[in-house]
Image: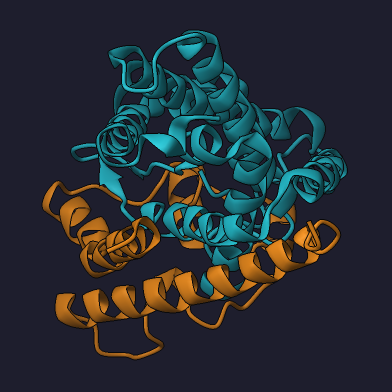
Amino acid sequence: MNITKKLWLGIGILALLSPLGIIIPKWFGAEGAWGEWGLDEIKKAAGFVPEGMKRIAELWKAPLPDYALPVESKGLAIESFGYVLSATIGIALVVVVMYIIARLLGRKDKAE
Amino acid sequence: MHIPDGYLGPATYGTMYAVTIPFWAIAAKKLNKSLKAKQAPYLALGAAFSFVIMMFNVPIIGGTTGHATGATLIAILLGPWAAMISVSVALIIQALLFGDGGITALGANCFNMGVIGGLAGYGIYTLIAAGSEVQSKRRWIAAAIAAYFSLSISALITGIEFGIQPIFEKSASGQPLYSPFPLSVAVPAMLGEHMVVFSIVEAVVTALVIKYFQKNNPEMLNS
């Protein structure tokens, strides 16, 4: 197996293991990241929701927020599945974008 | 470290776009000169690695979570300009598709993790590893130290961006309009949690992958 194949296999394994990124924090009772609270949480933390924050916090509606499936029923299995699926979709998109960028940038010296 | 929409005021997020875009342009120019067609898969691998490693949230017991970014690793293997572009592309997809990090804050997030992550990681690694044999111990130790400090510097800058909001962005009555926590809270929180936990994770991940390349594909570390 050549090196790029091995490395892609490594990325695939990481994608499959990615639910550890939600499961392990749960075990240790950890909340989200510092400074990444939603409006409800900031109200609890600071006692109020700053005006400007209220205006732009929900500016963008991401199709798969928090790497989760847009479903009501929550459970660790479903969350984990959504996370792996999100990792797969995300990696696929990132790869396509990077190949396009490499194509555009590598264009001029392709002839060499 | 993905700043969401609403935490930075327009003056800050506008400035951060204005600062980051020239770095993207320089990176594109540098890659345009040096990029060979056979390197495209490595660029894609780098961005994919950065994307997926950021999903591995690491907890502080009873506290917050954080993650590695892969910026230093990519910078060591492919250079700081490739690291900037790869990490930025990962961050842009994370923001647009998964709402991880804000749209207004994209300039800041790409600067903190991609631009600074790549430049600091590359600079520190080069400084320590200069002149060492490809398979020497010094290489992976340099990688670990570079990764540790690179992510910590990114965290410091992120903390400063949060912390200056109550100074510059307030209402007529003096109420903070965006992130309400002062520098004295934001900087110790961001820098502290990274120096104690998350930067160590970045150092270990980076050193392990560099060791893997030293053993199996030392030619990847030649440049």
Q: Nearer the viewer, residue B40 or A58?
A: B40
x and y percentages locating residue B215 in the rendered image: 25, 34
Q: Is residue A51 above or below residue A71?
A: above
Residue B192 visible, this angle = no
Write down the colour of chain A: orange
User: Quarter holding the C terminus of chain B?
Assistant: top right
* Count of all numbered marks drawn on residues in the image: 0
Q: Nearer the viewer, residue B17 or B75?
A: B75
Nearer to me, A23 or A45? A23
Choose top left, top right, bottom left or bottom right for residue B83: top right
Q: Residue B114 in the image: state x and y as whole percent.
A: 62, 42
- Tell me where residue B198 appears, x and y as whole percent: 34, 33
Residue B128 versus residue A47 in the image, above or below: above
Q: Does B162 sit left or right of B185 as displayed?
A: right
Q: Is residue B171 above or below residue A89?
A: above
Q: Residue at x 33, y 17 (%)?
A: B141
Q: Which chain is cyan?
A: B
Could you tell me if residue B214 is visible in this image?
A: yes
Q: Is B148 on the left or on the right of B59, as rendered?
A: right
Rendered image quadrant of residue B6: bottom right
Residue at image point 55% right, 17% down: B126
| Rendering colour mode | by chain
Say which residue appears at 71% left-offset and 28% top-offset: B164
Q: Is residue B63 left or right of residue B69?
A: left
The x, y position of residue A23, in whole percent, is 18, 60
